[in-house]
Image (cartoon, rainbow, N blue to C red):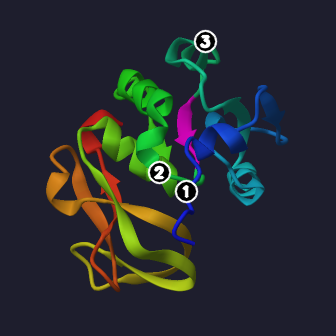
Amino acid sequence: IKNYKPTADAVKKVSGTKIWYSRTANPKYNIVAIDCGIKHSIIRTLKAYGCNITVVPYDTKADEILALRPDGLLVSNGPGNPSDATCVIDTVKVLKGKLPILGIGLGHQLMALSQGADTEKLPYGHHGSNQPVKIVGTPRTLITTQNHGYAVVKDSVKEGIISHLNGNDGTVEGIEYTDKK
């Protein structure tokens, strides 16, 4: 156990290497998803909301994404240390303000890093169902399923507004970048 080292560049190991498409009848939106280890349930959910999805490898450049003329960008969930996925962080930096961007799990952390925030390894991580997430400024708490070992450092968030906090340890679960789509 002492000799164990976490997998470096985990996103590179799980991302697809080719663009692929998931289409729906009568689409309302065309979404590009950066594959950092995307779950198919996320694609199914977006399709249920009338979205055509184009899934691109993690190392796809910003100009290639813009050439697809998406209505929005999803930075997907995935494994590993968010600081290792520098090419995704750089892509989000270039695309901020050019189209609406949503980050889920690791994608949320990559977006925060692209805006100058820091991430840290959690002592135990957030794993499993029934993870409480408080919506800041409301009495509401969501019960979520999570599987991540890193979190955005609250005091490092300078861009955006912290919108969601973990109900158990107070770590950042969501940030809204309202001025940058």
**Residue at (61%, 43%) from the top-left corner?**
11
Q: Position of residue 160 (x, y in %)?
A: 22, 47
Q: Residue at x 23, y 39 (%)?
A: 116
Image vertical order of residue 85 relative to residue 143, above or below: above
Q: At label 3, which amino acid type do we have?
A: Ala
List the residue tagged with mark 3: 67
Q: Taking 4 as reference, is 96 left or right?
A: left
| Residues at marks 2 and 1, CA–CA distance in whole angstroms | 9 Å
Residue 175, labelled with which disc? Answer: none
Instruction: Please report the residue visible at 24 percent of the width from the left and 46 percent of the height from the top.
Output: 117
Q: Find out whether residue 72 is within the magenta segment.
A: yes
Q: Compared to 179, does 154 lie above or below?
A: below
Task: Judge from the rendering whether residue 26 lies leftward or rightward of residue 176; answer left or right.
Answer: right
Asked if the residues shown at circle 2 and circle 3 are in contact, with their CB atoms under 8 angstroms apart, the answer is no
Q: What is the three-letter code of the residue carrying label 2?
A: Asn
Look at mark 1 in the image and give the residue it sits on. Answer: 6
Residue 46 spot, x, y in % from top left:
68, 51
Label 1 and label 3: CA atoms lie apart by 35 Å
Which numbered dot is residue 81? 2
The first of marks 1 and 3 along the sequence is 1
Q: Is residue 156 above or below residue 68?
A: below
Q: Which residues are magenta?
A: 71-76
Q: Are marks 2 and 1 in contact (CB under 8 Å)?
A: yes
Q: Residues within 10 Å of mark 3 (few under 14, many from 20)?
A: few
Q: CA distance from mark 2 to mark 3?
A: 29 Å
